[in-house]
Image (cartoon, grey):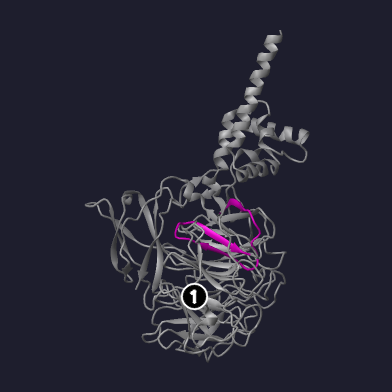
Amino acid sequence: MATKKNVSKTAKDSQQENRQTEIGKLTPAAHRRILNFINEAVYPQDLMYEKVTTSHGEGDFIHEDNPEEMIVKRKQILDYEIAKQILDVRDIEYPLGFRNFKEVLDITHLHSKYFDIFLHHFSNMFYGSWAVFPQNIPRRGPGSIDGVVHAAMLHTGKVLFITADETTMLWNPDDITPATFEDPVNQPHLTPNATDGYSVLCSGHSFLSDGRFLAVGGGGYGHNSKAIWGYKFDPISKMWTRTTGSMVHERWYPTVLTMGDQRIGNSHELLVTCGHGGGDMEIYDEVSDSFREVTLGDDKPFPSLYPGLHLLPNHNIFYSRTGWGSAGAGGGPFLGDDQSAYFVFTGPNTGVWNNIAPVLPSMPDRTKGMSVMMLSNTAPYVRILVIGGSDPSTNNTYEIIDTTSLSPSANWGTSTAFPDGEHRSLCSAVLLPDGNVFVCGGIQRTNSPCTIFNPQTNSWSPMAALPSIRDYHSVAMLLPSGKVMMAGWYSSTIEIYSPPYLFGGARPVISAAPPLVHHGQNFVIESPDASSIVKVVLVRPMAVTHQTDTQQKVLEMPYVHDHANPTRLTLTAPHGGHPHSLAQQGYYMMFAINSSGIPSVAKWIYLH
């Protein structure tokens, strides 16, 4: 009898050890996701299927490969009896919720196969994963605040930071040695003819046609009469230089847009808007290295700083209602920011604003929200997505407008709540190579939800929670690796997000590509994986500050497989018509994406 009891005890101990080993397979993030999924369930059906929602909150969605006919059902996780058993035990024995997945596994008849099912459905393959970069951003300048406020992805593969301590530095995301950060040859305030004590912190910026970076205005932590200059950074020489001419107005928190190529004569131009309490526009001319004012039609007041402006493929400028009513994380709602409009140039220095979407009581205030432009080769071709805002009564919602063909009668779609119910103010939105929009930050608590919007299915999917708080003064940016960098919010750490597509298998490789192509040109790339590649895109590198970069774009290129040479693809570079507002002259990251949705590491290419 004693022997039998000892054998039984040994078997039970062995079972416990096996389950403890299984628990050890879970990452802390996956463990947390599983517990949240189980503890938030109300009915057995809540545990039976994975969560997939459309913009209308439905459980099914149209499959992107066959939107007319194919409905994809949610994948089943558990059967009814097991789901009911889990909830019954939870409600009786764990009224505050399960504390460890081991408690779930200990439920009678919950076999190991269900552990494998949970492990699969809550793995990085579906949620992605966050990791902390091993080096912290050093503090070097006169400022007393840690972290970065501005970041720009340079075509050399390095990232330019304008830091919270009012200096600039370079970061190589591929280098994890102690020499990760380096100083440029000079700082903006030490360039020839520079203004003493001037800072490019809180400037607006964009890329010039040759890949240099232009920052205008700024002045640091407050309005500064010295902030009337532009400063250019050359990624090759790693040097800053000041513009020859100054702006008419000093500017703090301005928006800068790179315009279509050679709109007037042979010049390349950038539009500078807002940043001093009004909506006055100026135009920077690359050839003359000087600024000139927009003299007629510039009558939109823009209560917002950093107004959310997008250059549309038809050359017009669209205002998305996003922007900053004030500096800082709080405040709002800000009346006057809720009138969408588009600006049409009528001459070199003149234009007119056309209001659309009349202000209605039901339209949320989008101040301190975020907007991003989504392009497609099929209708609808151009859409603007707006997310969150400053008003806590409505900033758990988003809207979409089709800007393919704008008129004063155009209107926004229905304001729809996020599936996760979260309130987002000052969140970041990053376009991924597959065209999806990754949304993170803007929630002032650790382990805050992140999500991805699929514009082909209008569906949201939950992603791995952001480990830290990233709110005011934070930046998120796509890297050539296909990962997303997150930094800022008074923090010296950098976090790197690997999206789900990086856990789906081997990545395709672009083994050869031309360094330069012309608009509309056919060109060839080489890849040993050419037969599995289903999409090749150009992605405009980001230059982001205060969560804001309204110039993101993903451009899908037509391609033809070379059957005579199975390692080649013939692509057609974007065109869109003169002056190339669809794809401005400059450097782009080129990604190849295979049939499993997995992107390559980017190759840099110059579009001329």
In the figure, is residue 443 to the left or right of 133?
A: right
Q: Position of residue 190 (x, y in %)?
A: 53, 82
Q: Which image quarter is the N terminus in?
A: top right
- Residue 122 sits inside the magenta stretch: no
In the displayed structure, would residue 384 be above or below residue 124? below
Q: In the rendered image of this protein, does residue 547 appear above or below residue 75?
A: below
Q: Residue 515 versus residue 464: which sits nearer the camera?
A: 515
In the displayed structure, does residue 75 sit left or right of residue 334? left
> Crowding near pointer 1: few (<14 within 10 Å), some, many (20+)?
many
Asked whether residue 549 is in view, the answer is no
79 vs 22, nearest the viewer: 22
- Depth order, front residue of 509/137: 137
Q: Indicate the secondary structure of the residue bearing disc 1.
A: strand
* Viewer-side residue, 467 vs 322: 467
Q: Is residue 21 above or below residue 475?
A: above
Q: Position of residue 286 (x, y in %)?
A: 42, 84
Boundaries of the magenta span: 460-488
Residue sitting farthest toward the front? 178
